[in-house]
Amino acid sequence: MPWDQHRYPASMKNLPPSVRAKAIEIANALLEEGYEEGLAIRIAIAKAKEWAARQEL
């Protein structure tokens, strides 16, 4: 089930909006590739945080 800025996993609620948007984008892509929902969420959050850290350099 694809997520968006209004409907997303509870584990993403405390992320800053830009990081959450990236996590949603990544999670949706992972779901399309066939990843299990829980794994897709965990990977997406980690990768979005990495992305945000690179943006701050």
Image (cartoon, grey):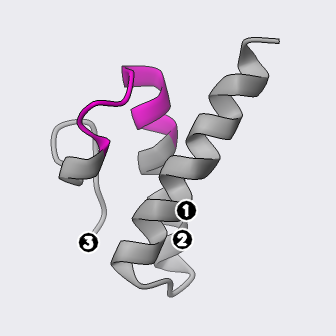
**Is the residue under label 1 in contact with that under label 2 (CB below 8 Å)?**
yes
What secondary structure is marked by label 2?
A: helix
Disc 1 packing (10 Å; few <14; some 14–19; many ≥20): some
Q: Residue at x 49, y 77 (%)?
A: 32
Apparent side of residue 26 relative to residue 57 in the rendered image (left or right): left
On-image quarter of the C terminus: top right
Q: Which mark is residue 21?
A: none
Residue 51: x and y, percent?
69, 34
Foreground of the two, 6 or 11 = 11
Q: Amino acid at mark 3?
A: Met
Disc 3 packing (10 Å; few <14; some 14–19; many ≥20): few
Is residue 16 located in the magenta-colored stretch of the structure?
A: yes
Q: Which residue is mark 3?
A: 1
Q: Is residue 11 above or below residue 34?
A: above
Q: CA distance from mark 2 to mark 3?
A: 11 Å
Which sits earlier in the primary sequence, circle 2 or circle 3?
3
On-image quarter of the N terminus: bottom left
Residues in magenta, as a range: 12-22
Q: Amino acid at mark 2?
A: Leu
* Front position among marks 1 and 3: 1
What secondary structure is marked by label 3?
A: loop
Residue 11 seen in the figure: yes
Which sits earlier in the primary sequence, circle 1 or circle 3?
3
